Image (cartoon, helix red, strand yellow):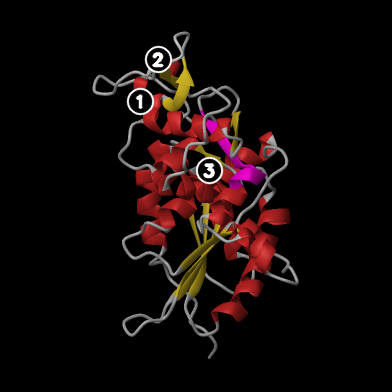
Amino acid sequence: MVLSDRAGADPGPTPHEPPDRGDSARSDLVILSGATGSSGRPRSAAIGPLDPRRPPETLTDRDVSALAFIGRSQEAAQYQLHEAVFPGLGEAVVSRRIRKLAARGLLAIERWNKVGINRLRLRPAGRDAVVERNGARDDELFLLRAPLAQSAVAHHLWVVDCRLIIERLPAPPTSAQPSWVLERRWNPRPAAIPDVLAIWRPTRESPGHFLALEIDIGTEAIRRTFVPRLVALAETLVPFAGTSPAFISVLTRGSRRVAAIQQAVASASIALPVVVDSLPPAAGRPAFAALRTLLTVGAKSPSHPGPA
């Protein structure tokens, strides 16, 4: 899968934005008073932004939110961070901010297959900064020693995309947690864990419901591997849901695989309803509108009736 988003690229300053002039920019200078010149009279000395004597720049609240988003995501693409934390700002602004955070050792940047996507990971110093500023608890953040394997990146990006959209639905869930968070919290670990578990708690107007989202990118055998996992996933979720409505939503690639999964699900014994739809043909930011429609409808899909 090739994602077309170019969020990682920095096209340079916009017509309304002054250029980044490095040491020559007067706003970047720190003045040291008391230095003496050749005449013996006091003078001021300027410290440029790359001078090691310069104090570190204070992290903004948005910086902390950005680092926390990356840490909660294990690994995030820059376009996802842009949507979550920097909405409405230009790509050049986001790229420049990311480079500054990386230069301070707070995050790591990897390029994905040279397709214009920056993959971002939190580093230990970034985690410490987030926790110190109360941006997130330590147990909410994930540090990867190395980038995700190439074979896992496409699936992971879809999961982060979907979680991002679910959290911003017109009626957002009380909680929307990805599999890596559930794996950390559920002990003992169940036989199957959804890619995203969204929970709407009961209110006076609604009984609440559970949505288990599975992203299928077509790499698994349907009857031998994928459907048995759906069976196990339903058995895991039924005790959690109790009498609340719950169902499984599957997003997969292409109409033919949708039909094949639907046929296999119909002949299997699964304790929860399973709704199967196609992933958007586009990927990355261009897919957000289609995902929003799919997940808004999915959040209202048929649910199991609960125990008799």
First reached walking from the N terminus: tag 3 or tag 1? 1
Using the image as rendered, state which of residue 136 and residue 133 is in the foreground: 133
The magenta segment is 117-126
Tag 2 residue: 24
Could you say where residue 73 lies in the image, as x and y percent from the top left? 56, 50
Q: Residue at x 59, y 78 (%)?
A: 240
Q: Residue at x 54, y 22 (%)?
A: 51
Q: Residue at x 66, y 43 (%)?
A: 219
Give above or below for 5 relative to 185.
above
Q: Is residue 217 left or right of residue 33?
A: right
- Residue at the extreme right: 188
Q: Please say whether residue 166 is visible from this viewpoint.
A: yes
Tag 1 residue: 27
Quadrant in which the N terminus is drawn: top right
Give above or below for 226 relative to 13.
below
Dot 2 falls on a residue whose secondary structure is: helix
Could you say where residue 274 lies in the image, as x and y percent from the top left? 53, 64
Q: For the residue marked with disc 3, what is the amino acid?
A: Arg
Q: For the residue marked with disc 2, what is the amino acid?
A: Ser
Alpha carbon separation for disc pair 1 and 2? 9 Å
Could you say where residue 176 lies in the image, as x and y percent from the top left? 50, 63
Query: Pointers 3 and 1 in contact (CB under 8 A)?
Result: no
Could you say where residue 46 lies in the image, as x and y percent from the top left? 44, 20
Tag 3 residue: 253
Alpha carbon separation for disc pair 3 and 1? 51 Å
Give above or below for 295 relative to 106.
below
